[in-house]
Each structure stands twice: as structure tokens, then as C-alpha cells.
Amino acid sequence: MTELENDNGGVRLAKRVAAQLGCSRAEAERYVAGGWVSVDGAAAEDPAARVMPEQQVALLPGATAEEPLPVTILLHKPADVGTTAALAALGADTLSGNGRFLKRHLHKLALATPLETAASGLVVFTQDWRVQRKLVEDGARIEHEYVLEVEDEYIGENALAGMNAAGTPAAPVKVSRQSETRLRIAGKGIRAGRIELMCKQAGLSFKSLRRLRVGRLALSGLQAGQWRYLQEFERF
């Protein structure tokens, strides 16, 4: 039995990588965890995975042994889908734009911008404590923008005035008419359920709600169910 074999003929992937590269076990584990190692041509992310001697293990171009950074995910949540179900559906097939998808990016994600199940639009999940603090602890200072659709045939001036009056000095809202049945709403400190309550108080029949923007970041071209990574240069 060789140094790289155990009783069943396999070896931990990180041990194999360390032996091939002549690096430390810790470095090898970071290569694997960062998605930089392939086994028989397929990317592998688990340093403890077992590989057989005949399997081909290789380092991918651009590989680095740096610890992967925490990620923040911007998702266009579909209507009538809870955030837990929407998170479970994330994967490489629904990723939009640039970014290397790693399974570890879906671990320990915190929901930073809750949204009603019935509503659609931008939802932010993060592994980064700095983003979590910005959007949760300091969330009252971040403006959110929505589009509200109502069942009513026409939104009258009194209803529009009632919607604008629903804000407070500490958390003002700006409501403008986009069409006869659609309103744009922008405000800070808007909690889940508040806009539907504003509708009821203004005598309007709530139909649908979509969040377009959180701070400086908008849905842009994300289709329902698609997601992307927050880029290093972007700020909320």
C-alpha cells in the first residue's frame, strides 16, 4: 500500500493535490474549496472527497490558494415563491452574468432584504457581515423602490394623496402614478406588508408588488428566477 492509498484504494482529494503540487495540505484544501481542482475533467469542491489512483486530478488555469471571499447574491424572486424556496432553487443554470459558481456560495447565506411571498423582485442574500450590517442594522437608511399594481380601474387623486400621507417624518415615502392602475413607490424603512396596508388605508385593492431597487442597485436585466453576484465595485 502506497502513501496515497488507503484500505479501499482511495485517498482524500486534498492529500492527492498536496502530493502532486508539493504544497501544504492547507493550501491544497484551499485550492479544492475554491473550485480550482478538477477530477476527470469535472470541477470538485470537497477536499475530503475520495479519489482513486487511476483518476485524473488537475489544477485549473488561474488557480489560487487564497481563501474564497464571502459573496452577496442578488436574486429576482418570482411572485408567490417564498424566499426559502427561491434560495433552494439557486444554481449555475440560473446564474446571470459573470462569476464562478461554487456550491459553498450557497452556504450560510443570510437574508438581508425580506420580501413578501406574494411579491416579486429584488432580494439580497449575503455571506458578508459588512453587507448584512449595511442592509439590516442600517437598513432604515437604505431606500427601496417598488412598482405596485392595483385592481382598481383608476387611481384617483385622493387615493394617491392617501398613499403619500402614509409615510412618517422618520420614514417618508414618495408615491407617483405610472399608469391608471400602477404606482411607483420609493421609501426607507418599508417593512414587509406595509405597502399592502397602505393600499387598504387609501381605499385601493392590492393586486401585485415588485421591488425594483435596493439602494443604488436595481433589478436591471435579471429575469424572474435569475440571480447574479454583487461585484466588488458595487455599493448599496
Image (cartoon, rainbow, N blue to C red):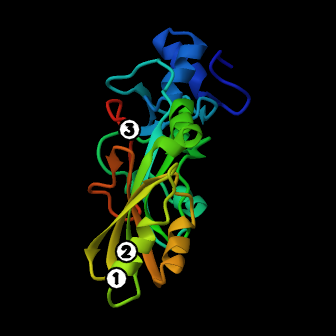
206, above or below 145, in the image? below
The percent position of residue 111, horizontal first and vertical second, equals 57, 49
User: Residue lying farthest bottom?
Assistant: 153
Structural distance between the alpha carbons of marks 2 and 3 = 45 Å
Q: Nearer the viewer, mark 2 or mark 3?
A: 2
Q: Residues within 10 Å of mark 3 (few under 14, many from 20)?
A: few
The answer to whether residue 127 is seen in the rendering is no
Along the polypeptide, which appears first: circle 1 or circle 2? 1
The percent position of residue 128, horizontal first and vertical second, equals 53, 33
Label 2 belongs to which residue? Answer: 160
159, above or below 223, in the image? below
Q: Dot 3 lies on which element?
A: loop
Q: Name the amino acid type tagged 1.
A: Ile
- Position of 25 with respect to 222 (left or right) is right
In the image, 159 versus 122, the foreground residue is 159
Identify the residue at image location x=35%, y=39%: 99
Q: Nearer the viewer, mark 1 or mark 3?
A: 1
Label 1 belongs to which residue? Answer: 155
Question: Residue 116 bears which disc, if any?
Answer: none
Along the polypeptide, which appears first: circle 1 or circle 3? 3
Label 3 belongs to which residue? Answer: 100
Circle count: 3
Rendered-image quadrant of the C terminus: top left
Q: Name the amino acid type tagged 2.
A: Leu
Structural distance between the alpha carbons of marks 1 and 3 = 45 Å
Marks 1 & 2, CB-CB < 8 Å contact:
yes
